[in-house]
Image (cartoon, helix red, strand yellow):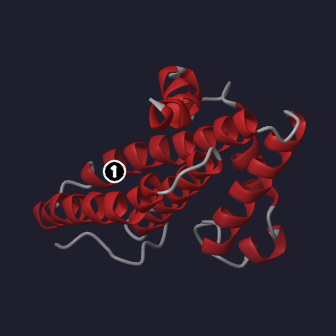
Amino acid sequence: MGRFLTFLPMLLVLAAGPGFSADAGDPAAQAIEGCLASYDAAAMQEKADGAPFKGATSYCTDKFFEACAEGRGWTQSAMNECQGEAAGYWMAEVSARTDKVRALGSPEIDQWLERSAGSFDAYRKDRCDRFDMAEGTMYAAIKWGCETDMQRERAEDLDDFLGNEPLIAKPE
């Protein structure tokens, strides 16, 4: 029963639904995307496709979490909710970017998407589930932080196929 109560705040965040979308009304989306838009604008102008540097996504996600948790009083519940919202933002981004990559219409890329999604999910689960072994209320927020980082990294991997000058071009 105690273990259930430890993760109850995380389950409540999951049940909230709308917090897990990257739409314009989502506070996580507004904060993270706003930060990314202004992050090192001069350096980003040098890039042809305007894609943010990979360090920017981590910085802006952390900045959202800190402002969110502070605004909600740095309670354990607030940290769980804010980390859940950040994870939800990146989950929605992974889904949207996967759809964009799949829309390229390349059988080779589609095969990579399927293979990598399976190995990513297995690694993400193994990596983040280690926090389920620990006792204490802080571990829910730590696990959400792990989920956030993993989803953000997956979104960055998918960016390799997107933009004006993708790192990996669609095979002919």
Q: Residue at (80%, 38%) from the top-left corner?
A: 75
Q: Residue at (22%, 66%) from the top-left corner?
A: 119
Quadrant in which the N terminus is drawn = top left
Q: Amino acid at mark 1?
A: Thr
Count the marks: how many? 1
Q: Residues within 10 Å of mark 1 (few under 14, many from 20)?
A: some
The answer to whether 67 is drawn above or below residue 117 in the figure is above
Residue 21 seen in the current view: no
Q: Is residue 167 left or right of residue 68?
A: left
Quadrant in which the C terminus is drawn = bottom left
- What percent of the width, then of the height, locates residue 124? 36, 61
Q: Residue at (51%, 36%) from the top-left corner?
A: 7
- What percent of the width, then of the height, locates residue 118? 20, 59
- What percent of the width, then of the height, locates residue 86? 62, 45
Q: Residue at (84%, 33%) from the top-left corner?
A: 72
Q: Is residue 25 left or right of residue 150?
A: right
Q: Is residue 158 left or right of residue 103?
A: right
Q: Is residue 108 left or right of residue 87?
A: left
Closer to us: 85 or 97:
85
Residue labelled with disc 1: 98
Quadrant position of residue 170: bottom left
Closer to us: 15 or 161:
15
Residue 98 seen in the current view: yes
- Which secondary structure, mark 1? helix
Closer to us: 115 or 111:
115
- What percent of the width, then of the height, locates residue 8? 53, 28
